[in-house]
């Protein structure tokens, strides 16, 4: 048992002169003295054996869960008889941080691989201050940009309303779901500057870019990634159509707002979700009593009751289903020329429907027609989409939410990439970048009582 504890202390039995453990219930205190070893003066590099004094140093060594563990180390301080230099003996504890052992440091860094970790919770668990934890993370987790891949996904996420740029730009590899980099702003000029800082040869290797229908991204891709083909994520197209259908539903519902007890208003208000469901997911075999309709029916029956309210709603629903069927295509069945004509027919149907919401969708589809057809390209057995980056966005939101928001972008970037990239790791040596934001310059201190006294003296004279 003793040997096991010594191993946990990053020591060997022969390294110890004395070793003692005090169990105080909520804490464990381990007192150690190292065996004497030959020492070299760091100034003149001669062998030194003369001990000046012993000093007790306390280190946090959190190796037992729910128990505060401290090492009291009797440190020898040597004095060089040749040059007079004084120095501490070599030991495994007195390294980067004055009161934290390397084992504790590694444990703290490993905690932040999970997206739920927060600075205050980790600080409380290890008996140190949140400021120290922030300093440790800033010094040892500094993630570099990863190289661009053949297929990349791009998107933005909301960072902080108090920061200079509210939306950050996320780049992710489609093949291995690796976050390649996070840029502070999604503005065109910032993104162009960022991509142009990457060597042209690397940018030319990007062949496909998956994105949502954001016009600024469409503008910068040909400028920054000359060989890239833009693919619009199919989920965003379907979401836009569903949003238009939902807007039409609200517009129709407002016509019945004067009588909120009528059947039409109640159905449009409380049973609208079946309109947004895929047709094959609508259950037509299980029956239940519907309290609004007042009789037993299935989901398909509720849907039909909704579509009977207004003819425009039925037309819009059918257009939504037509596009969804168009979107559900296997790689082997896709023919570009055939689907080009089919998409044109769908766009005409949207525009000529005489329904404002659907006509607006038709115009959008027409503006992004080529990019939508590019989304049917398959790579490495999967259809190119933004599904992987949307999943990461959810975890990013949780990280920022758990932290109650983060204002330091560099710190947030390192935290997100370290947590969300599976094989991302820390560096035990201190990083070269200063992550801490520069603070405001302090004004010169003025003692009000002293100033008032001087003014009174001047008035007297």
Image (tube, rainbow, N blue to C red):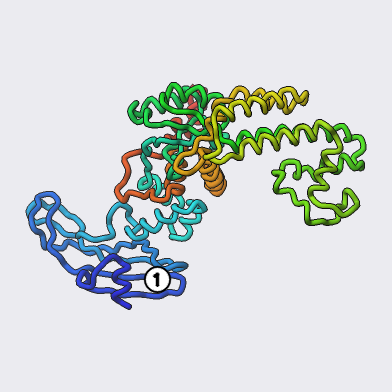
110 to 69, vertically: above or below: above
- Residue beneath the point at 56% across and 45% down: 394
Q: Is residue 450 visible?
A: no
Q: Position of residue 337 (x, y in %)?
A: 56, 27
Say which of 129 and 421 sits in front: 421
377 to 418, vertically: above or below: above
Q: Where is residue 169 in the image (x, y as percent from the top left)?
A: 49, 33
Say which of 390 and 80 sits in front: 390
129 to 303, vertically: above or below: below
Query: Which corner quadrant of the image does residue 370 belong to?
Result: top right
Report the side of 200 relative to 420 (left or right). left
Query: Which corner quadrant of the image does residue 442 belong to?
Result: top left
- Residue beneath the point at 52% across and 25% down: 218
The residue that label 1 is drawn on is 28
Q: Which structural element holds mark 1? A: strand
Q: Counting other residues with Cα less than 10 Å from the Cα at mark 1, is it few (<14), some (14-19), or many (20 or more)?
A: some
Say which of 345 and 305 sits in front: 345
Q: Can residue 293 be seen in this view?
A: yes
Q: Position of residue 271 (x, y in %)?
A: 80, 45
């Amino acid at each position: 048992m003793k040997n096991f504890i010594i191993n946990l202390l990053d020591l060997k039995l022969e390294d110890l002169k004395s070793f003692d453990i005090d169990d105080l219930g909520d804490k464990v205190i381990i007192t150690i003295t190292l065996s004497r070893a030959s020492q070299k003066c760091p100034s003149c590099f001669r062998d030194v054996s003369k001990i000046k004094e012993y000093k007790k140093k306390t280190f946090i060594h959190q190796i037992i869960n729910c128990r505060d563990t401290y090492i009291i180390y009797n440190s020898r301080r040597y004095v060089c008889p040749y040059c007079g230099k004084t120095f501490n003996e070599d030991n495994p504890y007195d390294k980067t941080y004055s009161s934290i052992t390397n084992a504790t440091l590694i444990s703290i860094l490993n905690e932040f691989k999970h997206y739920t970790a927060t600075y205050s919770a980790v600080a409380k668990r290890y008996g140190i201050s949140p400021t120290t934890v922030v300093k440790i993370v800033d010094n040892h987790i500094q993630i570099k940009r990863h190289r661009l891949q053949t297929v990349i996904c791009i998107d933005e996420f909301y960072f902080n309303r108090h920061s200079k740029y509210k939306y950050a730009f996320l780049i992710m590899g489609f093949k291995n779901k690796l976050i390649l980099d996070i840029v502070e702003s999604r503005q065109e000029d910032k993104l162009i500057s960022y991509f142009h800082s990457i060597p042209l040869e690397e940018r030319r290797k990007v062949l496909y870019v998956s994105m949502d229908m954001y016009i600024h991204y469409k503008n910068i891709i040909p400028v920054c990634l000359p060989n890239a083909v833009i693919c619009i994520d199919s989920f965003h197209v379907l979401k836009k159509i569903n949003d238009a259908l939902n807007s039409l539903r609200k517009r129709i519902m407002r016509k019945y707002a004067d009588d909120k007890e009528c059947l039409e208003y109640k159905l449009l208000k409380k049973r609208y979700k079946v309109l947004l469901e895929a047709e094959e997911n609508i259950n037509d075999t299980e029956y239940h009593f519907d309290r609004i309709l007042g009789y037993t029916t299935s989901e398909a029956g509720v849907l039909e009751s909704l579509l009977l309210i207004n003819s425009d709603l039925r037309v819009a629903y059918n257009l939504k289903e037509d596009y969804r069927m168009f979107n559900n295509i296997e790689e082997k069945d896709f023919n570009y020329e055939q689907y080009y004509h089919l998409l044109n027919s769908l766009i005409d149907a949207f525009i000529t429907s005489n329904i404002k919401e659907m006509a607006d969708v038709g115009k959008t589809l027409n503006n992004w027609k080529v990019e939508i057809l590019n989304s049917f390209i398959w790579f490495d057995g999967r259809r190119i989409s933004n599904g992987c980056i949307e999943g990461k966005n959810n975890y990013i939101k949780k990280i920022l939410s758990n932290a109650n928001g983060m204002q330091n972008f560099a710190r947030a970037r390192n935290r997100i990439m370290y947590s969300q990239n599976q094989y991302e790791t820390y560096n035990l040596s201190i990083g070269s970048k200063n992550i801490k934001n520069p603070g405001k310059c302090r004004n010169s201190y003025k003692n009000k009582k002293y100033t008032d006294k001087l003014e009174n003296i001047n008035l007297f004279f």
